[in-house]
Image (cartoon, rainbow, N blue to C red):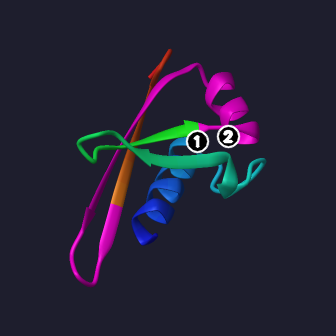
Amino acid sequence: MAGDFSVKEAVSKCFGTGVRNFSLMDIEVLRDSLGKPYVKLYGGAEKIFLEMGGKALHVSISNTKDLVMAYAVLEGEGF
């Protein structure tokens, strides 16, 4: 759960808004068949992504027994 929360926080940083004008529930963290994380956006998060000209969001999660970190990279027009 900490990794998923970290991804959601990293995505909000890409938007430059923090968690404003959308809910953390608007970001769904999933994993492909190999365990690679990816996100699906809904509601306000999807709206912000599209308004920014977003084309793709790339995310990664790293963790140890005690710590977790995630990063997100927003790819799109003008970036």
**Badge nearest the viewer, 2 or 1:** 2
Q: Which of 19 and 62 is in front in this view?
A: 62
Determine whether the residue tagged by mark 1 lies in a helix, strand or loop: helix
- Residue type at mark 2 is Ala
User: Which mark is drawn over residue 45?
Assistant: 2
The residue tagged with tag 2: helix, strand or loop? Answer: helix
Spatial separation of the CA atoms under disc 2 and disc 1? 9 Å
| Residue furthest to the front | 33
54 part of magenta stretch: yes
Q: Which residue lies furthest to the bottom in this view?
A: 66
- The C terminus: image quadrant: top left
Residue 64 point in image, percent of width and height: 21, 75
- Residue 77: numbered disc: none
The tag earlier along the polypeptide, 2 or 1, is 1
Q: Which residues, given as a range, are shown in magenta? A: 41-69
Could you say which quadrant of the image residue 54 lies in? top right
Q: Which residue is painted at 68% across and 47% down in the image?
A: 26
Counting from the top left corner in percent of width and height, residue 5 is at: 50, 64
**Label 2 with label 1: CB-CB less than 8 Å:** yes
Q: Please state which of residues 43 and 55 is positioned toward the viewer in this rendering.
A: 43
Q: How crowded is mark 1: few (under 14 residues within 10 Å), some or many (20 or more)?
A: some
Q: Is residue 46 left or right of residue 54?
A: right
- Look at the picture and state if 24 lies above or below 74: below
| Mark 1: amino acid | Phe
Taking the spot 29% from the left edge, 44% from the top edge, the residue there is: 36
- 56 left or right, relative to 28: left
Identify the residue at horizontal 75%, vertical 40% (top origin). 44
Residue closest to the eye, 17 or 23: 23
* Residue, disc 1: 15
